[in-house]
């Protein structure tokens, strides 16, 4: 079913968009011009994200402007001006320096939306160390994987998360020198320190050392189909891209109040929950609480949010809640809604227009791209169901792989193929930590292959089709099936496990596991519940399987690889395709 485009009458828009003419912006674009809108470190000492996001404003006219407005889950509120954020991030940078961390050393956080997370990120950039946030709903096993693969030297977290998820495995994390606790007032040991106390004792002056734009700033873990999570490396120069997308896609204007609902443990929470709004010197709202339809509408109203960046699962939850936001709340300040992370169904776009009085703009990107690549721009006609068009400075194409390890660009409109990008933009990942081969495999014939299948229509709008691999997107969180299967296999009753994403109308995909048992073990409801509990405890409820089905054998191909494609086809009642390589010759 096709949906009518949502046209824009530019004269009726409350604020003139930063891009009025897409084609012209594309032709005129240059990264040098974007770079010249940032300041650079004094005396030509390079480019540092925290200088651009905080110090530049604190030293200029925005010293007393609110940078972060934090809303506590219990109703409290704290504001941090650009001037205050400068002092606090300086203190944090001094702590890192004092405990011996320097350029390239990894600092991990395991916390939700708390002010310390933002201060730590900015202080880490200042010290030219590397910020590596973790999803706070992860259980002990994914946390261990990421701390150990990322060689984290410092972890910032709460006492509860530390005790529940980290302390018992600390001996297996030899790189982890210090844990800084945000909610204790005294040090609990030489390597288990109170962050408030360290902050109090620390100096609020700090000189950012020379920072090469290619110095590593961020490490974000993402999942692959096979193997354990991959650490995507991003550099300080990514700030150019965050700034550019803040200007052209999120369409920031100086008076804007912005709210990004993404969890700080995933890349949207960093690129757009921290960096982009601060680069533009606007007010960034941060809400500590989890999703709640009524609360969210109230935040839009009371905080006078003008630009809102959220995700399809949240929009569908709001849709289901039966609330009619624009009827019950004064949303007169809200001028733009953006969505990312999973397919945004056209019905949600149309509901959004009615419910909020402004359309929802879908956009597309990935952990590896570091920032938005394809978007519905504010001035552009929206085609419900489409991710939009590529950004200025970005070349995107639909390609077909040939059997000679080359790719052929598909010119014909609406043909499905691999979504590919021409490498070279500033927030492009520079590698997977310690995994050069895995990184190289992402490129072919001068293109970066995104792992997504898509099509492009005759007017250059891109439409998402599916992932090309077995990666699961559940509530917008990327989950690698191998990581889940490995945990299930640790249970003494499990012989084999295969994990897929089962389509779900609310959360996009639900994690489902197929399990075969060891000889002598009987499938039962009790065992099914035990396995679900086991997985939740180790992985965290957000990524553990919600459904488990017992099979006599989990299908594998002749080289022993689990055939998730077959599991999924069976689950969906689809033809199972060519099974000639299936073990046992099914
Ligand atoms: O499959 C695409 C899906 O999410 C993947 C990237 O996920 P992640 O690395 O966690 O990045 C999060 C930052 C956005 C993509 O490869 N995806 C992202 N945006 C969309 C999407 N699928 C459909 N429509 C989108 N707008």
Image: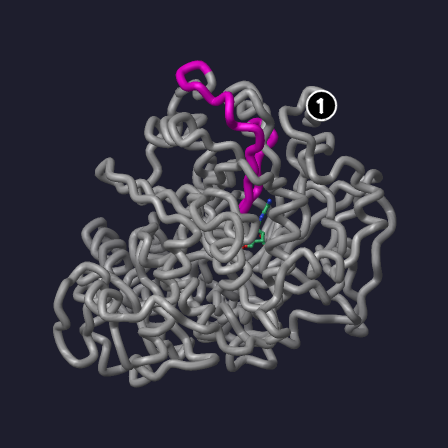
Callout 1: few (<14), some (14-19), or many (20+) C-alpha neighbours within 10 Å? few
Q: Is residue 181 above or below residue 358?
A: below
Badge 1 element: loop
Residue lying at the far top of the rendered structure: 327
Residue 539 percent coordinates (x, y): 31, 61
Q: Quadrant of the N terminus?
A: top right
Residue 376 percent coordinates (x, y): 67, 38
Does the segment drawn in magenta span residue 330? yes
Which stretch appears magenta?
327-347
Residue 578 visible (yes or no): no
Report which residue position mark 1 lands on: 4
Q: Is residue 393 above or below residue 229?
A: above
Quadrant in the rendering for residue 420:
bottom right
Q: Quadrant of the C terminus?
A: bottom right
Residue 391 percent coordinates (x, y): 72, 49
Q: Is residue 460 left or right of residue 338?
A: right
Which residue is more in the foreground, 364 or 336? 336
Residue occupying image coordinates x 41% and y 59%: 86
Q: Is residue 74 above or below residue 543?
A: above
């Amino acid at each position: 079913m096709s949906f009518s485009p949502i046209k824009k009458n530019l004269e009726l828009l409350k604020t003139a968009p930063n891009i009025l003419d897409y084609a012209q912006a594309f032709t005129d674009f240059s990264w040098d011009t974007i770079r010249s809108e940032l300041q650079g470190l004094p005396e030509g000492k390079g480019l540092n994200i925290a200088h651009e996001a905080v110090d530049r404003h604190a030293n200029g006219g925005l010293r007393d402007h609110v940078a972060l407005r934090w809303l506590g889950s219990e109703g409290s509120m704290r504001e941090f001006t650009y001037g205050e954020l400068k002092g606090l991030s300086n203190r944090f940078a001094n702590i890192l320096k004092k405990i011996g961390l320097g350029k390239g050393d990894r600092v991990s956080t395991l916390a939700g939306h708390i002010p310390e997370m933002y201060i730590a990120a900015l202080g880490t950039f200042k010290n030219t160390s590397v910020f590596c946030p973790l999803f706070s709903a992860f259980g002990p096993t994914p946390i261990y994987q990421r701390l150990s693969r990322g060689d984290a030297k410092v972890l910032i977290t709460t006492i509860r998360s530390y005790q529940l998820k980290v302390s018992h495995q600390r001996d297996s994390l030899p790189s982890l020198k210090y844990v800084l606790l945000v909610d204790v007032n005294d040090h609990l040991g030489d390597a288990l320190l109170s962050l408030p106390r360290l902050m109090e004792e620390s100096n609020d002056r700090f000189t950012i050392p020379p920072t090469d734009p290619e110095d590593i700033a961020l490490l974000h873990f993402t999942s692959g189909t096979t193997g354990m999570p991959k650490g995507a490396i991003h550099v300080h120069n990514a700030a150019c891209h965050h700034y550019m997308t803040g200007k052209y896609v999120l369409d920031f204007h100086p008076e804007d109040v912005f709210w990004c609902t993404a969890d700080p443990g995933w890349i949207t929470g960093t690129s757009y929950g921290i960096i982009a709004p601060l680069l533009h010197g606007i007010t960034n709202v941060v809400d500590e609480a989890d999703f709640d339809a009524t609360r969210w509408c109230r935040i839009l109203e009371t905080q006078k949010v003008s630009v809102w960046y959220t995700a399809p699962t949240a929009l569908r939850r709001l849709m289901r809640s039966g609330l009619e936001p624009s009827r019950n709340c004064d949303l007169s300040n809200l001028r733009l809604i953006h969505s990312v992370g999973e397919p945004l169904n056209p019905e949600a776009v149309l509901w959004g227009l009615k419910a909020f009085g402004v359309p929802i703009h879908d956009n597309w990107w990935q952990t590896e791209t570091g920032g938005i690549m394809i978007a519905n721009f504010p001035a552009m006609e929206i085609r419900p169901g489409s991710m939009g068009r590529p950004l200025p400075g970005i070349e995107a194409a639909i390609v077909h792989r040939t059997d000679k390890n080359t790719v052929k660009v598909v010119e014909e409109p609406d043909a499905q193929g691999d979504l590919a990008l021409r490498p070279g933009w500033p927030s492009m990942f520079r590698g997977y930590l310690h995994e050069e081969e895995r990184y190289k495999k992402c490129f072919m014939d001068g293109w970066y292959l995104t792992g997504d299948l898509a099509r492009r229509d005759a007017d250059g709008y891109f439409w998402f089709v599916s992932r090309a691999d077995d990666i699961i997107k559940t509530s917008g969180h990327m989950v690698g099936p191998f990581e889940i299967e490995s945990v299930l296999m640790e249970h003494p009753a499990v012989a084999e496990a295969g994990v897929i994403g089962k389509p779900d109308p609310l959360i996009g995909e639900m994690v489902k596991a197929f399990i075969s048992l060891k000889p002598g073990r009987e499938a039962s409801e009790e065992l099914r519940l035990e396995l679900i509990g086991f997985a939740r405890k180790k992985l965290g409820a957000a990524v553990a399987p919600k459904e488990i089905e017992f099979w006599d054998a989990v299908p594998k191909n002749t080289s022993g690889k689990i055939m998730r494609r077959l599991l999924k086809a069976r689950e969906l009642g689809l033809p199972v395709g060519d099974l000639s390589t299936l073990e046992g010759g099914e």
